[in-house]
Amino acid sequence: MTIDGRTRVAGIIGWPVEHSLSPAMHNAAFAALGLNWIYAAFPVDPARVPEAVRGLAAAGCAGLNVTIPHKQAVIDCCSSVSDAVAAIGAANTLVPDGDGGFRADNTDAAGFLRALDEQAPLDLAGRDALVIGAGGAARALVFALRSRGARVRVANRTPARAAELGEAVPFVPQALETVAARSALVVNTTSLGLHGDAPPPELPLAGLGRDQVVADIVYRPGGTPWLAAVGARGARTVDGLGMLLHQGAAAFEQWTGHEAPTEVMRAALGADPPG
Ligand code: ATR
């Protein structure tokens, strides 16, 4: 594709941002649909977020993703926020508002639900769900699971943060195993499991098995040892790439108005086709 005077520019802001997989995913999607768009990564110093968002809006940027650590800071730079952003308190997608600014949305929650529906569908209405962690990602997850009618419990190393999000569960192995064992869905949103070859001892394992769905939103090539161990015990598993893919697809659709070519985007992420 030729970059010319009509090329629309989208991108991602973060700090750091050079390891983001989003440019590969979105540029593959633009190419597949023959759209004259490009997607770039913009490293934005935390002290300069308002300048960067307003400057990109002024320059006609056609869509932005937002990653750590800017997901909260961008909200005040936008002209309006979606219901999801208002509930979650974090934004990952900015869409031109037609009036020279951006409106803020959060597609992490919808992205997680799409990944769940694709990889391990289950009816959450009236069922117990356990979210481990209470950071920005956990807030999106709690919102998503409540929207499906789940009763959400939250376990976090710092208990006060868990209590802000839902019914708190002590972050000690025995309590976690007990609550995990009676939950239809267990999700790890912490960075535990990002490193090392063995499942982290803090995460539940013995209480998990068949008839349960377990998700790890940590993304790691080849999957996390915890998810592999849980899968070996018979649980259905949902990995972090699915959420990354589907939050991106939902953003793409808002920016371009086209249905996202999810299989092209999945391949660009190096993920296996579903099923
Ligand atoms: P994100 O936006 O990705 O959720 P975050 O807001 O920094 O990132 O939240 C990180 C989460 O991982 C928190 O729940 C954090 O627990 P604390 O609230 O106690 O900080 C959790 N976390 C990170 N490292 C951890 C560790 N080594 N053990 C347990 N929890 C950890």
Image (tube, rainbow, N blue to C red):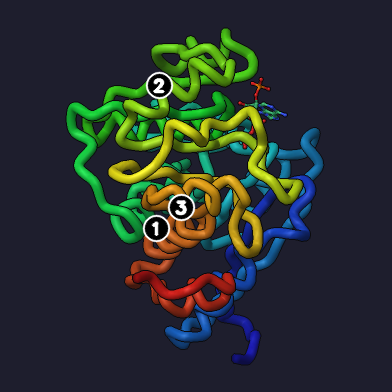
Where residue 32 is drawn, which disc sits there? none
Question: Looking at the image, which residue is at 47% across and 85% down?
Answer: 32
Question: Looking at the image, which residue is at 58% across and 64% down?
Answer: 10
Mark earlier in primary sequence (3, 1): 3
- In the structure shown, which secondary structural element does the residue marked by tag 1 occupy? helix
Question: Looking at the image, which residue is at 54% across and 53% down?
Answer: 228
**Disc 3 residue crowd, few under 14, some 14–19, many 20+, Cα 10 Å:** some
**Whether label 3 touches label 2, CB < 8 Å:** no
Left or right: 88 as drawn, with respect to 127: right
- Residue denoted by label 2: 179
Task: Give the x, y percent position of residue 218.
Answer: 60, 47
Ligand 1, what quadrant?
top right
Question: Looking at the image, which residue is at 57% across and 17% down?
Answer: 171
Left or right: 196 as drawn, with respect to 86: right
Residue type for callout 3: Gly
| Image quarter hosting the C terminus | bottom left
Q: CA distance from mark 3 to mark 2?
A: 18 Å
Task: Give the x, y percent position of residue 124.
Answer: 23, 36
Seen in the picture, residue 76 relative to 48 is either above or below; the reply is above
Residue type for callout 1: Ala
- Residue denoted by label 3: 231
- Residue denoted by label 1: 250
Of residues 59 and 109, which is closer to you in this image?
109
Q: CA distance from mark 3 to mark 1?
A: 28 Å
Q: CA distance from mark 1 to mark 2?
A: 32 Å
